[in-house]
Image: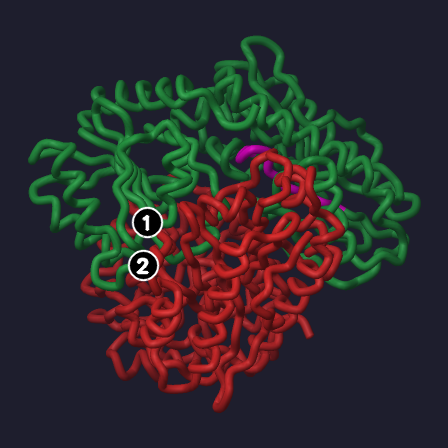
Chain colours: A green, B red
Amino acid sequence: MRGFAPEEFAIRVARAQHRMQETGLSALLLTTEPQLRYFTGYLTRFWESPTRPWFLIVPISGKPVAVIPSIGAALMAQTWIDDIRTWSAPDLEDDGVSLLADTLRELTPENASIGCPDGHETHVRMPLADLRHLESAIGARQITGDHGILRALRMVKSDAEIAKIRTACQIGAHAFARVPEIASAGTPLDQIFRNFQRLCLEEGADWVPYLAGGAEQGGYSDVISPATQTPLRSGDVLMLDTGLVHDGYFCDYDRNWSVGPASKAIRDAHARLVEASDAAFDQARPGVTASQLFHTMNTILTDGSAGTDAGRLGHGLGMSLTEWPSLIPDDHTELQPGMVLTLEPGIAVDGKILVHEENILITEGAPEFLSPRIGPEIAEI
Amino acid sequence: MRGFAPEEFAIRVARAQHRMQETGLSALLLTTEPQLRYFTGYLTRFWESPTRPWFLIVPISGKPVAVIPSIGAALMAQTWIDDIRTWSAPDLEDDGVSLLADTLRELTPENASIGCPDGHETHVRMPLADLRHLESAIGARQITGDHGILRALRMVKSDAEIAKIRTACQIGAHAFARVPEIASAGTPLDQIFRNFQRLCLEEGADWVPYLAGGAEQGGYSDVISPATQTPLRSGDVLMLDTGLVHDGYFCDYDRNWSVGPASKAIRDAHARLVEASDAAFDQARPGVTASQLFHTMNTILTDGSAGTDAGRLGHGLGMSLTEWPSLIPDDHTELQPGMVLTLEPGIAVDGKILVHEENILITEGAPEFLSPRIGPEIAEI
């Protein structure tokens, strides 16, 4: 099934409103793609255009109110939202600010605290000058943080969300299985990247917002580069890391291949990576923290060798390629059933790095691999 | 050639610094993907991850300084930038804010105005709470707008930038020419979307960040929806609108097809759209304004019929799918050689809409089609 039943959005809104009451917020003011989509189901690639701001207000009771450019009205009207207020954007004099201020004044009391996500992993997707205009146009109302409401809600996925991530992971698995069709010694890396995206589409991805990787002798230099035109050669380690989308939900995992027989150092490094992700997987039960998963992997990875510059060893995923929590020493988020995580250990090998990534689901009991679990042996092409 | 010669970045920086001197700015503070890439050449799809903030400071003299997560250091070191300061992100206590504040204090005087793009089409890509912390950590220094410096610079493309957009448009043309291979009566629209993205990749796109479109009887209801699973049927008008990327630069244009013979209303509407874009094309010379192009098209389009909800009839494009200026009545930006524009007329037909879009280059003399100019007859599949 595409999308969600209206009841799912009603539950999300009710949960947000419950937390708003606890924290004294009269409304949420939301500006980014996943924030709007979470409460409305509004799914479009039009966010690629930076031109127009989009706003959603979640009041303390009742359904959310959309304050959006008129170009989006027809599509928003297909969602469960029925209060849709539009302006003709872009408007160089007043790009929705007055309409937004009027709506906030209508929906909230004079002394309202209006929660706008302002913490880690967020930004406010509207011009800063307009935000400042808005703050002076709403009187004594204050724009504050959202007390982590969005983070807490989005971090735990519903069954319907998990089903979409599971499908995305399966599509990725089918595409990864076909990599030997498109990659062998002599194939330029940029051609592999193009063809891998094609495989993702052929296997059912709606679109492919993310692909990174690398291929160099004995590892790679970093994991976020676009492809070079350099052909694969024997001794390279090829890595592909994709975030493909199914119905608005991501997978995010990678695979490695040795071009020709792998050296012992590479075989050992790959086995160490899988040992690390397997150990974190075995530990990943409700109540365990993100920090503990980090330390479990890091102990295995840094036994006598350097770490990488990635900054973390995994993260949440869902509507965005990366979400909370982060597998870092300072993130003490407790795992809960319904969280979807990446386990993403990295290791340095003779000045290069290797990374490995899996996607897992936290359940009441043992976790579940959403990406197909692999063994310690690196694949060879 | 991929990327740009270092001299190109030096020219961009020198132009920015000249305008900074004129406007009294001691530095620019940049936070978004195109802003950083414009001055550095830093190209990665890793921005898809919302987790980490990235910063670039353009001081009043000298080269820009990157303040970025350590995961990006290796790739940034491949650019012409040599002052790269990193922290291990994500850091839940201090996600680069102190490092950024220290760097701003080092590079600017105590009473500095630091320009951060804050106007139309911009946002600040860092947590709002962190921006507020930053403002209190830099003493008497003020974060102000950038006086439109980024907009003015990016709006006029260099020859090297134009070459990349031209290539993107050509790739799009080859993909559009192959649409009859993938679309005919009975084909579900989502399958067409997947296969069209595949065609874009086969024809050389690096990736396909944007695809929208529609297919309904006698037009479509909006132009930003993702694909439904509905099969094409005779009497539908299919529209595909793509923003594919070549070396970090976009094309953004569309094509329409009638499934089976088109009705007279559709044939007339399509001819009217092309008449409108042709008229704007003929007029698009240096000194003419964006507003004038709007009125030229709008007069042809609304002769006795309603407009659409798009809000504008074209826009700039380049490093982003949509850029300044906007073809709206209030945008009096004068065209200059080196601007790349979309002409995007839309028309209402019996409760549905049709849109048409071309990409053109403004030169010293007559403009040039970057997308292949089409005639008034709607194509039939």
> Which amino acid does the dot numbered 1 rest on?
Pro
Q: Is residue B330 above or below residue A198?
A: below
Q: Residue at x 42, y 74 (%)?
A: B155
Q: Which residue is mark 1?
A: A69
- The CA span between labels 1 and 2 is 8 Å
For the residue pair A255 and A329, the one nearer the viewer reads as: A255
Q: Which numbered circle lies on residue A90? A: 2
Q: Range of the magenta residues?
A: A239-249
Quarter of the image with the N terminus of chain B in it: bottom right
> Does any portion of residue B210 appear in the rendered image?
yes
> Which amino acid does the dot numbered 2 rest on?
Pro
> Does any portion of residue B89 appear in the rendered image?
no
| Residues under numbered marks 1 and 2 in contact, where contact means CB atoms less than 8 Å apart | yes
Residue A241 image-quadrant placement: top right
Residue A98 placed where, x, y %?
Answer: 17, 50
Q: Is residue B89 above or below residue A50?
A: above
Badge 2, how many Cα within 10 Å: few under 14, some, many 20+? many
| Horizontal side of residue A142 vs B132, given as left or right | left
Q: Residue at x 32, y 73 (%)?
A: B291
Residue B206 placed where, x, y %?
Answer: 67, 58
Q: Is residue B90 magenta?
A: no
| Residue that sits furthest to the top in the current view | A365
